[in-house]
Image (spheres, helix red, strand yellow):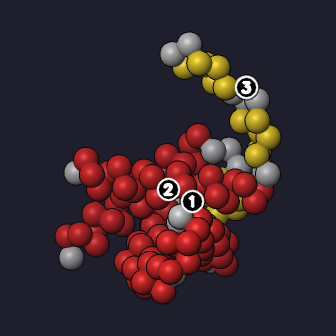
Amino acid sequence: MKKIFRMIIFSGVAIFVTALWNKGFIIKADPLTYIKAALVITAVYYLIIPVSKLVLLPLNIITFGLISMIFYAFIFYFLLNNFNLINIKEWTFLGIKLLGITLGEVKVSGLANIFVSSFSISTIINLLEKII
């Protein structure tokens, strides 16, 4: 039970942080919406991803994990979009200068933003699990 509760909290934090930096990832500033989205992401992580790892194992070996990335992004978008919890659209990353490295302006399409958002949320959740 404690592990599931932590995953719900980690999912909520990941959604919040992704919405802060990704202007194309739009979620209503309503606590109930965050809780619902966190519950959906937690269900995906505990129910769908373990089964998909088993089923997609041969394809993952052949494609070096590309199929899993596409599958996870699709599931992420499908579930959250069908529950009307988030809206993912195109946006323009204005660039950043960090430690002498400059990233210029980049236009991110709606499809690419699905992958970026999915990657961001899964990375934040995995980092939080490693740290805590």
| Residue at which label 3 appears | 104
| Residue at which label 2 appears | 121
Residue at x 35%, y 49% (from the top left corner): 127
Q: How many marks?
A: 3
User: Tag 1: residue type?
Assistant: Ser
Q: Using the image, determine if residue 101 lies above or below residue 123.
A: above
Q: CA distance from mark 1 to mark 2?
A: 5 Å
Left or right side of 129 for 53:
right
Q: Using the image, determine if residue 76 lies above or below residue 116.
A: below
Q: Using the image, determine if residue 115 lies above or below residue 73.
A: above
User: Tag 2: residue type?
Assistant: Ile
The tag earlier along the polypeptide, 1 or 3, is: 3
Tags 1 and 2 touching, CB below 8 Å? yes
Left or right side of 68 for 130:
left
Q: CA distance from mark 3 to mark 2?
A: 23 Å
The one nearer the camera, 81 or 113, is 113
In which quadrant of the rendered view does residue 2 lie?
Answer: bottom left
Q: Residues within 10 Å of mark 2 (few under 14, many from 20)?
A: many
Left or right side of 89 for 123:
left
Residue at x 28%, y 63% (from the top left corner): 6
Q: Position of residue 52 (x, y in %)?
A: 48, 81
| Residue 18 in sight from this viewpoint | yes
Q: Secondary structure at mark 3?
A: loop
The one nearer the camera, 10 or 107, is 107
Residue at x 50%, y 56% (from the top left corner): 121
The circle drawn on residue 65 is none
| Residue at which label 1 appears | 118
In which quadrant of the rendered view does residue 10 lie?
Answer: bottom left
Residue at x 56%, y 72% (from the top left corner): 62
The tag earlier along the polypeptide, 3 or 2, is: 3
Left or right side of 28 for 125:
left
Q: Position of residue 29 (x, y in %)?
A: 57, 54
